[in-house]
Image: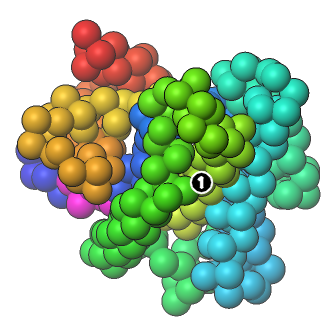
Amino acid sequence: MLSFLSSLPGAAAQGAIWGIMAVGVFITYKILDLADLTVDGSFGTGGAVLVVCTAGGMNIYLAMLLALLAGCAAGFVTGVLNTKFGIPAILAGILTQIALYSVNLRIMSGKANQPLSAMKYKDILLVTLRNINKSLLVCGIFVVVIIALLYWFFGTELGHSLRATGCNQAMARANGINTSTNKIIGFVLSNGLVALAGGLLAQYQGFADVNMGRGAIVIGLAAIIIGDVVFGKIFKNFALKLLGAVFGGIIYYVVISFVLWLGLPANDLKMLTAAVVALFLG
């Protein structure tokens, strides 16, 4: 039991990182009512950009910004495919996700895995396995800032028009709202946050991998659903709903740590994730 308890801070830190990713998924899944599979690719893009830029000597904050912008670009492509080419959102996301696999390989110079030494960059990295307490603090700051900015944004006229687009597109268009532009903005915001989380995870685990985003959408949905089921009745405010998604990510990883402590093979984690999502959806 002591080994499980000692793993809780690390699980909370990793859960908070994935919770930030879940906030990105929240924008398309809950607000725009769209299924966006781009995140499986844009998550890895954020990690790849962060690692390559940091290893090249770039300032860590600038590297994080570039990771976010790379995710925004991926979301923009999905948005254009969906709105301008008339491709269904789920298929547009799959197409972008497939393309991002090659893009991520190119970013990492053809390597499937790019390390980022925690020892070499220990004074630079914002989050790392070697300093869990600092990682928890940094993740907490990111969560507060992101939720505060999103709460402000979705309280603006543009933010309200995005929410109207997700609620009823026909009514939104009838009121003069450009739903196509709003969808693109939603995809951009969502994948920007997903890539930012990818950059944080790459720092935390000390490497970027071309497959690090595989299954990210399932984890994101699991975090959102868990947060909604556990906190839905008490978290009515929009900001608190976003926070619920983050808490859902933390709960998810605490559960994963507990199950691993019980002796479940790591190879069965994906199956467990699917079972958890199905359980909470039911």
- Secondary element at image label 1: helix
The span picked out in magenta is 7-14
Q: Residue at x 55, y 74 (%)?
A: 118
Number of labels in the image equals 1
225 up-or-down from 271: above or below: below
Residue 199: which quarter of the image? Answer: bottom right
Q: List x then y, in percent, for residue 269.
A: 41, 26
From the image, which quarter does the C terminus lie in?
top left
Give the residue type at disc 1. Answer: Leu
Q: Residues within 10 Å of mark 1 (few under 14, many from 20)?
A: many
Residue 100: which quarter of the image? Answer: top right
Q: Residue at x 88, y 41 (%)?
A: 102
Q: Residue at x 76, y 48 (%)?
A: 76
Please check the rendered image and state whether residue 242 is part of the magenta-colored stretch, yes or no: no
Q: List x then y, in percent, for residue 238.
A: 29, 50
47 up-or-down from 180: above or below: below
Q: List x then y, in percent, for residue 43.
A: 62, 48
- Which residue is more in the foreground, 186 or 203? 186
- Residue 248 is left or right of residue 45, and the answer is left
From the image, which quarter does the N terminus lie in?
top left
Residue 112 in sight in this render: no
